[in-house]
Image (cartoon, rainbow, N blue to C red):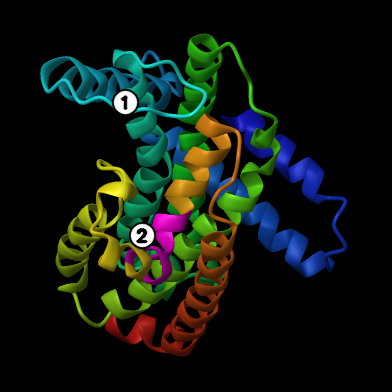
Amino acid sequence: MKGVVRRVSNLARWLPIAPKWWAKLDLLKALVQRDLEARYKGSVLGNLWPLLNQISQLLIYTYVFSIVLKVKLSIQGLPDNNLTFGLWLFAGLLPWIPFSTGVAQGAASVITQPNLVKKVVFPLALLPLVPVLSLFLESTLGLMALILMVAITSQTIHSTLWLLPLVWIPQLLLTAGLGYLFAGFTVFLRDIPQTLAVILNLWFYVTPIIYPASAIPEQWRAWIFWLNPFTAIVEVYRDLVLVGEVHHWGEWGTASLVSLVVFLGGLWCYQRLRPAFADVL
């Protein structure tokens, strides 16, 4: 996992960014590495745990839905067997888990670091980004496992995989934007993490992750696609990894625009509230 962070950092060096921003990016990279190391510090398997956890989820969902409940799903390019529904469900959970957990941990990122807020000259804008990026990097291990399983079952590796950054960008913008927004407000309203857990739970069931979008009543389907940006993110994710064709470009464009607005709005609120953090913590 540290190697992934280092390679991403080396590639980013080619970008035309001012030296002061490189210093902040280096600090962010160090914080993400420290966060990843702290998550599994002292464990024997170390950074293999995220991969094992995600593979166990894949096996559990496949067993429950495909073998016990006998849910069948026909996916273009995948064989009609018990593993198909598990792969389809896992492809929906892969973007959702780092999103929901990243928003929840980002919301608590400021109140759990009072020393950085009060006693040290520290770029506080980095705090909500640390859990967001750590969880996103962890999810790439599950993505590699999913691609491997799809390649084994379908005997194909889709060329659309190189388009995955197009769905990662709105996913990261939406996660970071909500992380900023709730991190700022949580300093003043400590009920927000509990409220957020309820909202994310409702959001999960409104998004077609454990059921296909075709199961949504037709009169509601367009509303769910256009008003819930994560619906487009999940569907495009599945299109790219499982199907090999993208069927939701319009919804993806709207989701990307909404995610950008949420990111800019969340960052703006966070920056406006930041001067008062030290007085409250």
219 up-or-down from 185: above or below: above
How busy is the neighbourhood of tag 2: few (under 14 within 10 Å), some, or many (20 plus)? Answer: many
Instruction: Please state which of residues 157 and 216 is positioned toward the viewer in this rendering.
Output: 216
x and y, in percent, of residue 94 in the image: 41, 38
Q: Amino acid at mark 2?
A: Val
The picture quadrant where one finds residue 277 is bottom left
Specify whether 171 is left or right of 4: left
| Local secondary structure at mark 1 | helix
Q: In the picture, which quadrant includes the N terminus? A: top right
* Residue corresponding to mark 2: 103
x and y, in percent, of residue 150 in the image: 50, 19
Counting residues from the start of the chain, the first of labels 1 and 2 encountered is 1
Tell me if residue 184 can be seen: yes
Q: In the picture, which quadrant includes the C terminus? A: bottom left
Instruction: Please state which of residues 150 and 105 is positioned toward the viewer in this rendering.
Output: 150
Specify whether 14 is left or right of 149: right
Is the Cβ of the residue at disc 1 closer than 8 Å to that at disc 2?
A: no
The residue under the point 43% across, 48% down is: 234
The residue most toward the left is: 68
Q: Which residues are magenta?
A: 224-232
As for residue 58 lying within the magenta part, the answer is no
The residue under the point 25% across, 48% down is: 215
* Residue corresponding to mark 1: 85
The picture quadrant where one finds residue 170 is bottom right
Q: Amino acid at mark 1?
A: Phe
